[in-house]
Amino acid sequence: MRPLLILRPEPGAGATAARARARGLEPVVAPLFRLRPLPWDAPPAEAYDAILVTSANAARLAGRVPAGPCFAVGEASAAAAREAGFADVTAGPADGEAAAALMAAQGVRRALHLCGRDHHAVRHPEIEVERRIVYAADAVERLPEAARRALDEGAVVLLHSPRAAATFAALAPPRPRVSLAAISAAAAAAAGGGWGEILVAAAPRDAALLELAGKLCNTPPPDAAATGR
């Protein structure tokens, strides 16, 4: 079985690793980013109709819970928001624009977007979005030895975001024996070329990504399959 390289930051990396082990896979955890909260000022409650949370990390690291209903991108972000104490949490689609469309359909016209320093600016023609950067994800300077060994063994690499894909590609030269499992087409594109194969999960969720990775981990590396070894 090929090792499964997990690059997302903690605590998400540990959760993905636990789910991978439950599937019989062999995860190697090597987070590419270290998360840290940033100071921020909340606008008065009357300045917005609802809160938009586009990542679980924003909910965990915000350090405070603004008043008002919360719309979260995906079930993981919604669960993190509830755990952090946000009230009236609605789990929207796993896409910022789709979540904004859901907010607009429910009458939201002003939104407070809690996000990371490196974020996708969510926009909607009917919503005025005010952003607050509540955390930073600082990239590591090099991959740990365990990750490099896994790559040498023809690992399957999980790419949970375009930024993770680009950072990984900058730290690791492409290897024809390595397979990449990307959570989206944008993440796949950010990884560049030279890899053995790059496949995109059926849905932008960790469960779908692991389902794809499970199939890849149980197949030989691309070059071995081609030569019959």
Image (cartoon, grey):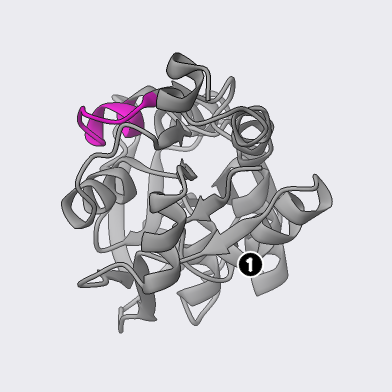
Three-letter amino acid code of the residue under disc 1 = Gly
Say which quarter of the image contains residue 67. bottom right
- Which percent across, then down, holds residue 8? 46, 58
Location of residue 210 with respect to 220 vertically, above or below: below
Residue nearest the viewer, comparing 123 with 61: 61
- Which percent across, then down, holds residue 86? 65, 66
Residue nearest the viewer, comparing 217 with 184: 217
Residue for point 20% across, 72% down:
141
Q: Is residue 114 left or right of residue 74?
A: left
Element type at marker 1? helix
Question: Is residue 173 among what the camera can see?
Answer: yes
- Which percent across, then down, holds residue 31? 43, 66
- Crowding at mark 1 (Cα within 10 Å: few <14, some 14-19, many 20+): some
Residue for point 37% across, 23% down:
185
Question: Is residue 87 among what the camera can see?
Answer: no
Residue 172: within the magenta? no
- Which percent across, then down, holds residue 195? 30, 31
Location of residue 94 with respect to 10 vertically, above or below: above
- The mark tally for this picture is 1
Residue 192: within the magenta? yes
Location of residue 128 with respect to 141 vertically, above or below: above
Q: Which residue is mark 1?
A: 14
Residue nearest the viewer, comparing 186 with 170: 170
Start-end of magenta stretch: 186-197
Residue for point 65% across, 31% down:
208
Residue for point 46% across, 49% down:
153
Quarter of the image with the N terminus is top right
